Amino acid sequence: MSFETISVIGLGYIGLPTAAMFASRKKKVIGVDVNQNAVDTINRGEIHIVEPELDMIVHAAVTEGYLKATTTPEAADAFLIAVPTPFKNNDSEIPEPDLAYIEAASKAIAPVLKKGDLVILESTSPVGATEQMAEWLAAARTDLTFPKMHGENSDIRIAHCPERVLPGHVVRELVENDRVIGGMTSKCSEAAIELYKNFVEGECVTTNARTAEMAKLTENSCRDVQIAFANELSIICDKLDIDVWELISLANRHPRINILQPGPGVGGHCIAVDPWFIVSKTPEEAQIIHTARKVNDAKPEWVINKVKLAISDFLLENPTKAAQDVTVACYGLSFKPDIDDLRESPALNITKSIVNMHSGKVVAVEPNVSELPISLKDLTLVDFDTGVKADIHVLLVDHKEFKLSTIDSKYLVDTKGIW
Ligand code: SAJ
């Protein structure tokens, strides 16, 4: 089998780097995205997301003619679907995964599928999503056969191969990480391995599609549970007047203990989302996973209460001042250190809440962004030297710049324990 033309559907944080890696191995790659602006940007040899090294790889791939982007799918030998899988109903107690993007992508590629093609679902998905994707494809193409009914003899090969790369290290991790290959049949897995071996140097480990789906959800849920443990410890220690950072470093000297770090909550588009895919499928059984989500989701409110306490302590000790005279500085807005990504960021949400509740000035120090979103028009972006002049200091993200400085103030809420 040879994959001369590869199509990647969804050119976001995972799809674009993956498309670029195939193109860098001199494969003809057709990237497909519904966002015309993203398509135009890529076709100019530029990128619309922030990821180290990616700009150079995309620029080379486009100028050498190996990568092009389009809004309409074209025929290819392999299709990789890397579209978002968000929640359906954010307000319900247990959010449900929304497979609408996978459904739309399946229906978009169905007309151009041909006998022998391989379709891989890379999007992090609830268990059963790959089988569902195959059903959407089969319903749209009754002239082709699929693994569920025709097993190893099917015209189309289907697999789930979840992405597992860390934002900020995507280019390296795409090549080096081991890859879970969940084919709907053995031949499907073999085909997927052959495809990934174009650039993956890690081991490609085969399983079935359902186990591959669950493996990805398990990895992120495991991290969520561990962070929840650290966050719970931080609240317990605060009550018992113990330094949680010292406590964790002491406990971690035990050869079999490795506690993660507490923080202002869990952000990003993966760890705070994926555990819900397990909980919504098996709500009775997923007790620890569900509780961890609730513990991590409750942490921002705890931090906001700490800030309220700091403001009232400040006012008690400075009776000539009113709340509107008090300036609060928030340090860090992104969802984790040393990146510019503000989406699903607990730091950003905490800062927004402080802006809403506090009648005085709120300033933010965020070395990784030059401009704030319009939704934060009441917040002023300042440099570190201006931030330190504030009355109350709220450290929300342990960016490397902040680790080099310190703030000596009684009115400090340090959610990362660096000051
Ligand atoms: N966090 C803590 N304490 C810690 C570690 C992290 O509070 O000790 C917080 C971070 O500040 C952040 C959140 O957790 O708000 C998530 O950050 P992260 O670095 O743990 O993970 P992500 O979301 O950037 O990427 C994860 C990775 N999964 C695992 O490490 C198991 C990555 O490999 C996945 O590919 C990615 O999710 C994904 O796309 O699913």
Image: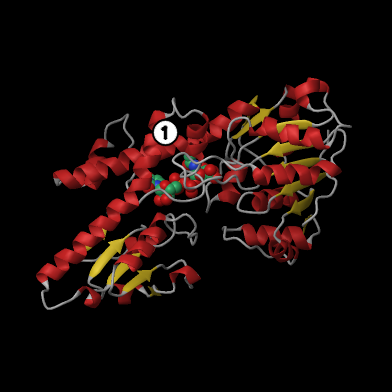
- According to the picture, the residue beneath numbered tag 1 turns out to be 289
Query: What residue is shown at x 42% (from left), y 68% (from top)?
Result: 367
Taking the image as drawn, is residue 219 in sight?
yes
Where, by quadrant of the figure, is residue 40 drawn? bottom right
Where, by quadrant of the figure, is residue 389 drawn? bottom left
Drawn side of residue 271 relative to residue 139, left or right: left
Query: What residue is shown at x 83% (from left), y 44% (from top)?
Result: 76
Q: Is mark 1 within 8 Å of ligand 1?
A: no
Assign the N terminus to one quadrant of the image. top right
Q: Position of residue 319 (x, y in %)?
A: 10, 74
- Out of 89 and 364, give the one closest to the viewer: 89
- Out of 9 and 78, give the one closest to the viewer: 9
User: Which scheme is used to colour this image of the protein?
Assistant: secondary structure
Q: Position of residue 60 (x, y in %)?
A: 72, 60
The kind of residue tagged 1 is Ile
Kind of element beneath mark 1? helix
Q: Residue furthest front?
A: 92
Q: Position of residue 197 (x, y in %)?
A: 70, 37
Mark 1, other Cα within 10 Å: few <14 / some 14–19 / many ≥20: many
Taking the image as drawn, is residue 263 in sight?
no
Drawn side of residue 86 relative to residue 401, left or right: right
Number of marks: 1
Query: What residue is shown at x 22% (from left), y 78% (from top)?
Result: 325
Drawn side of residue 190 relative to residue 97, left or right: right
Q: Is residue 190 above or below residue 42?
A: above
Q: Position of residue 39 (x, y in %)?
A: 73, 61
Assign the C terminus to one quadrant of the image. bottom left
Query: What residue is shown at x 71% (from left), y 37% (from top)?
Result: 120
